[in-house]
Image (cartoon, rainbow, N blue to C red):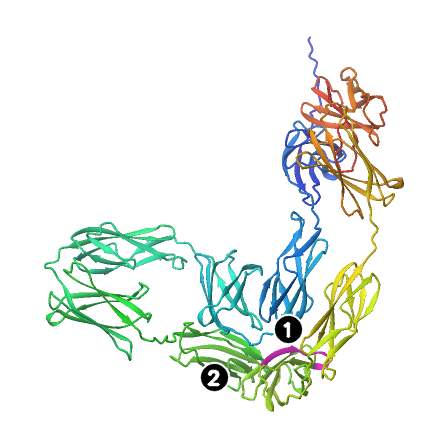
């Protein structure tokens, strides 16, 4: 017999780390690492983090929870930006999980103030002013501000653009989103002597380049400043500029869109005397790129003197930039102009090439030119323009006699083709062309004539001075169909084409006035059914239609208890009544002036019991005139009609207002009664309103009582309801704020260990938060921390500079109530000496586990730091972190520490233990631990 001893070992379970994510909080700089260990819950997971220089920045250990999930939170000790690497290990993990993450954190810089470039300004009604706010400091994290006006009936503000809308005084306030800090500009608006209008505005948009041309006219004539503001589809200012009007008040802006966002842009134009900025819109579409080009002919044969029109088709059909250039490979054979007209000049072959301006795509046509039998000439050419019809007649004679082809091309003063034609000569070679100008531009036109055998085109010019009527080519409506209830009103808008058609007049009609009537495009639903509303152009009789379907109102509705009164003091018309269908019903109103034109159109929703109210100002005021009011609602069989007479009563207008004080100084909580005197004494309307430019400083009620609420300055303004006259009182509110100072600051640097100790005193006493910031010689933040002051306001910071640079370091110390941070400096020379030394006692022992013993000894002459020291043992299997054991104790001089790692049958596996000494090792992730000794490796 013989035997074989079989030893069966447990198959090690392979443990893996997975689902690892790394997130960096941009606000706090904190890093969160989460993941999963396959061995489940209750297992120790270890992490090592290395900074961009490869130095150990953070080490930690945690225990996995349900499903093996684990989580680490920490703030990088160095705080340097760049690529950090992580290594994660656990018992049973063969190779540590490795990953990288980018770290970039900038400390939040708070706003300390804001200022405006203009403190006060005087504008005329309609003028626009750009205010610029500067947030301090320049590198503040949140630069956002909000704008407000103390009186929007005087001046409005949007994105810093102030628009003067009425006479008076308004305070424009800018407020920082961070901190609520403010600055103000006092705007005084004066009446404009003559009402000024902006008119004849045209807007041209080149989608290919984003270029915009805005032209128009200001009624106040030449030499007037005109301001433009262009707002993009997102509501942001895209372009702001100012120009001076030329002859006849004509002005022009030419610019390129800054953002070039597809959508609708808003244009606002203002000038001195313009009551309300002129507004218009235009649409910008992103350019469609060119993908190719083709010609209508690939080859052609001509005789010397002949002309051929080539037509290029740019693809796609909706490409934005369809511009092309033309060229000939041999201009002694054939020439081509920039309109694609080829002229045969000599026998031979030439290749005509068309090239797209965008993309450089090409297409070609091969031209073969034959000799002409004889030399041909064109003579006796005359050009006549009929002054009545504008018709143009070109006559002449070709020397080759009758039956010859004669071609003509006519160019406008802008070198665009106006006419192309061909005819056959008659007796004696005479020919005639008769046509009407296609473009109708006044100026000098060029005529080119060609014929077989003609060596080069005959060329002449003529003057065209005929006023062209632009005919209507069509009309469209903004709606094709609509459904209304009886009593509803709908405004239809007609667009005559082309935009510059001479006669824009249209006529409106309804196919069934028992269903819907129409007047000036305003459709009124009167009965159930369908009606077709048709708009017809006076010029050409072009039409467009909208199908109106009128439905029965749910129940028969009536309008009753209607009253109309005119308040001549506030210049308002008040129409009140009641709709029988109750609350929440739409009620519409049309007001016709004594001449039958619409003066006001509106809509409101009925309130409790069906009551409704309209308040409006008449646009056209006719003394003694009779105005017609038409009221509609869903279910109303026909509009309710009533009338009222406008009789303007004589009132005594307000001419001014004054306050009994121009300025006053208050303490927080004080009150002050201001008295306003309206002039003249017998003015009809003595009503006034009160406002404060800064309600964080002082508030005012409508009786003129001012209450001081916060330190600073506020302007109290009284405004008359009649005329908007104002007067102001400057209120200064003072506050006794205790001044806090930092004193008795000392800085000591231990030359052996490199540790820095900063001590001082804050005058506000104990339990006050004191913050320190330390900047290295290159101006970078090296250390940031916060502590709470002790008895008598004393505080203390102990740290080791993390950048370890020689040179001058700057210290800033701040606390609540300190006006300016205390600043001092210290010189630092890098010391390689750490406070503690680690001395391994023998090697690792492998008895019932893995044992490690070290002696931690304080280096003589090094200062103690606050708190206990932590000795950390990390077990490694090969290069994989396995587990961590930490011992926390106050080491005054020397400490021997022995730890045992519970490893079953460690055998001859390659285990090592690395030993560290830190100042902390806990769940506090606000600051990273400080390394107090050079680490040692035990085998």
Q: Which mark is residue 35?
A: none
Q: Return the x and y of residue 305 as percentages of the image width and height.
A: 17, 59
Residue at 78% of width from left, 38% of height from top? 924
Q: Return the x and y of residue 164 as percentages of the image width and height.
A: 61, 69
Q: Is residue 90 left or right of residue 297?
A: right
Q: In this rendering, is residue 871 above or below 3? A: below
586 in magenta? no
Mark 2: few/some/many CA within 10 Å (<14, 14-19, 20+): some
Q: If you read the primary sequence from the N terminus, does the residue marked by circle 2 or circle 1 appear first?
A: 1
Visible residue check, residue 304: yes
In the rendered image, which residue does mark 1 sit on?
167
In the rendered image, which residue does mark 2 sit on?
511
Mark 1: few/some/many CA within 10 Å (<14, 14-19, 20+): many
Counting the numbered discs, the total is 2
Q: Which residues are magenta?
A: 600-610
Residue furthest to the right in view is: 791
Which quadrant holds residue 747? Answer: top right
Q: Is residue 109 left or right of residue 762?
A: left
In this view of the protein, which residue sits in the foreground, 1 or 218?
A: 218
- For marks 2 and 1, give the CA distance: 50 Å
Look at the numbered disc 2 and give the secondary structure of its residue. Answer: loop
In this view of the protein, which residue sits in the foreground, 551 or 79?
A: 79
Q: Return the x and y of residue 91 as percentages of the image width and height.
A: 72, 28
Q: Is residue 692 left or right of residue 158?
A: right
In this view of the protein, which residue sits in the foreground, 189 or 392?
A: 189
Quadrant into which the N terminus falls: top right
Contact? badges 2 and 1 (CB < 8 Å): no
Visible residue check, residue 153: no
Q: Nearer the viewer, mark 2 or mark 1?
A: 1
Q: Return the x and y of residue 392 as percentages of the image width and height.
A: 25, 73
Look at the numbered disc 1 and give the secondary structure of its residue. Answer: loop
609 in magenta? yes
């Amino acid at each position: 017999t013989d035997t074989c001893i079989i030893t069966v070992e447990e198959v090690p379970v392979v443990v893996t780390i997975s689902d690892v994510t790394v997130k960096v909080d941009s606000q706090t700089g904190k890093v969160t690492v989460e993941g999963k260990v396959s061995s489940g819950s209750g297992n120790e997971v270890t992490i090592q983090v290395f900074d961009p220089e490869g130095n150990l920045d953070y080490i930690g250990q945690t225990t996995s929870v349900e499903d093996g999930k684990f989580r680490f939170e920490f703030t990088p000790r160095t705080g340097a930006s760049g690529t950090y690497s992580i290594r994660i290990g656990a018992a049973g993990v063969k190779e540590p999980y490795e990953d990288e993450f980018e770290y970039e954190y900038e400390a939040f810089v708070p706003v300390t103030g804001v200022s405006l470039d203009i403190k006060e300004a005087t504008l005329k009604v309609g003028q626009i002013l750009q205010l610029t706010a500067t947030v301090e400091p320049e590198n503040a994290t949140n630069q956002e501000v909000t704008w407000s006006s103390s009186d929007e009936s005087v001046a409005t503000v949007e994105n810093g653009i102030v628009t003067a809308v009425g006479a008076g005084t308004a305070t424009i306030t800018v407020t920082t989103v961070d901190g609520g800090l403010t600055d103000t500009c006092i705007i005084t608006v004066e009446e404009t002597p003559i009402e000024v209008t902006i008119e004849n505005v045209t807007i041209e948009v080149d989608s290919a380049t984003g270029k915009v041309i805005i032209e128009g006219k200001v009624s106040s004539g030449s030499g007037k400043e005109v301001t433009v503001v262009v707002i993009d589809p997102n509501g942001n200012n895209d372009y702001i500029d100012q120009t001076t009007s030329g002859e006849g008040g004509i002005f022009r802006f030419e610019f390129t869109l800054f953002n070039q966002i597809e959508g609708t842009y808003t244009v606002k134009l203002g000038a001195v005397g313009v009551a309300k900025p002129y507004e218009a819109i235009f649409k910008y579409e992103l350019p469609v790129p060119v993908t190719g080009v083709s010609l209508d002919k690939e080859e052609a044969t001509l005789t010397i003197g002949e002309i051929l029109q080539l037509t290029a088709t740019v693809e796609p059909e909706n490409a934005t930039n369809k511009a092309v250039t033309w060229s000939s490979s041999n201009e002694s054979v054939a020439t081509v102009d920039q309109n694609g007209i080829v002229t045969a000049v000599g026998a031979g072959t030439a290749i005509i090439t068309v090239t797209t301006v965008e993309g450089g795509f090409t297409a070609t046509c091969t031209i073969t030119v034959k000799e002409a039998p004889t030399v041909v000439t064109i003579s006796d050419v005359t050009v006549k323009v009929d002054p009545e019809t504008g018709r143009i007649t070109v006559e002449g004679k070709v020397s080759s006699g009758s039956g010859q082809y004669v071609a003509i091309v006519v160019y406008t003063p802008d070198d665009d083709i106006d006419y192309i034609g061909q005819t056959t000569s008659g007796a004696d070679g005479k020919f005639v062309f008769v046509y009407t100008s296609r473009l109708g531009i006044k100026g000098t036109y060029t005529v080119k004539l060609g014929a077989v055998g003609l060596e080069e085109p005959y060329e002449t010019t003529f003057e065209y001075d005929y006023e062209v009527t632009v005919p209507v080519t069509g009309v469209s409506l903004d709606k094709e169909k609509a459904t209304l209830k009886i009593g509803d009103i709908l405004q239809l808008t007609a667009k005559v084409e082309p935009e510059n058609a001479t006669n824009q007049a249209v006529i409106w009609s309804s196919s069934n006035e028992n269903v819907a009537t129409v007047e000036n495009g305003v459709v009124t639903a009167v009965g159930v059914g369908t009606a077709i509303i048709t708009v017809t152009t006076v010029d050409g009789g072009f039409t467009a239609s909208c199908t109106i379907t009128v439905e029965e109102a749910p129940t028969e509705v009536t309008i009753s208890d209607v009253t109309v009164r005119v308040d001549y003091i506030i210049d308002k018309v008040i129409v009140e009544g009641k709709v029988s269908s109750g609350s929440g019903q739409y009620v519409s109103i049309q007001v016709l002036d004594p001449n039958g034109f619409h003066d006001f159109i509106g809509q409101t929703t009925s309130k409790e019991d069906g009551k409704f109210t309209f308040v409006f100002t008449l646009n056209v005021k006719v003394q003694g005139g009779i105005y017609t009011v038409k009221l509609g609602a869903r279910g109303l069989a026909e509009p309710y009609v009533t009338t009222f007479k406008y009789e303007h009563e004589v009132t005594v207008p307000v001419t001014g207002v004054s306050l009994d004080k121009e300025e006053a100084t208050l303490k927080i909580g004080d009150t002050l009664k201001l008295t306003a005197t309206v002039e003249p004494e017998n003015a009809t309307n003595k009503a006034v309103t009160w406002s404060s430019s800064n309600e964080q400083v002082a508030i005012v009620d409508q009786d003129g009582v001012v209450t001081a609420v916060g330190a600073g300055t506020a302007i109290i303004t009284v405004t008359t309801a009649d005329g908007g006259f104002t007067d102001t009182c400057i209120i200064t509110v003072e506050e006794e704020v205790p001044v806090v100072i930092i004193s008795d600051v000392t800085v000591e640097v231990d030359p052996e260990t490199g540790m820095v100790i900063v001590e001082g005193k804050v005058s506000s006493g104990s339990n006050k938060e004191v913050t320190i910031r330390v900047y290295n010689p290159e101006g970078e933040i090296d250390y940031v921390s916060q502590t709470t002051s002790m008895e008598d306001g004393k505080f203390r910071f102990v740290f080791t500079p993390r950048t370890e640079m020689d040179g001058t370091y700057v210290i800033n110390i701040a606390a609540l109530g300190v006006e300016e941070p205390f600043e001092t400096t210290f010189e630092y020379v890098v010391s390689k000496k750490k406070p503690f030394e680690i001395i391994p006692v023998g090697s690792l022992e492998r008895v019932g586990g893995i044992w490690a013993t070290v002696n931690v000894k304080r280096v003589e002459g090094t200062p103690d730091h606050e708190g206990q020291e932590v000795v950390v043992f990390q077990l490694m299997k090969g290069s994989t972190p396995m587990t961590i054991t930490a011992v926390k104790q106050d080491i005054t001089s020397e400490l021997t520490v022995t730890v045992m790692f519970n490893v079953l049958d460690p055998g001859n596996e390659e285990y090592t233990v690395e030993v560290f000494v830190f100042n902390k090792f806990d769940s506090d992730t606000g600051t990273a631990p400080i390394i107090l000794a050079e680490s040692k490796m035990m085998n």
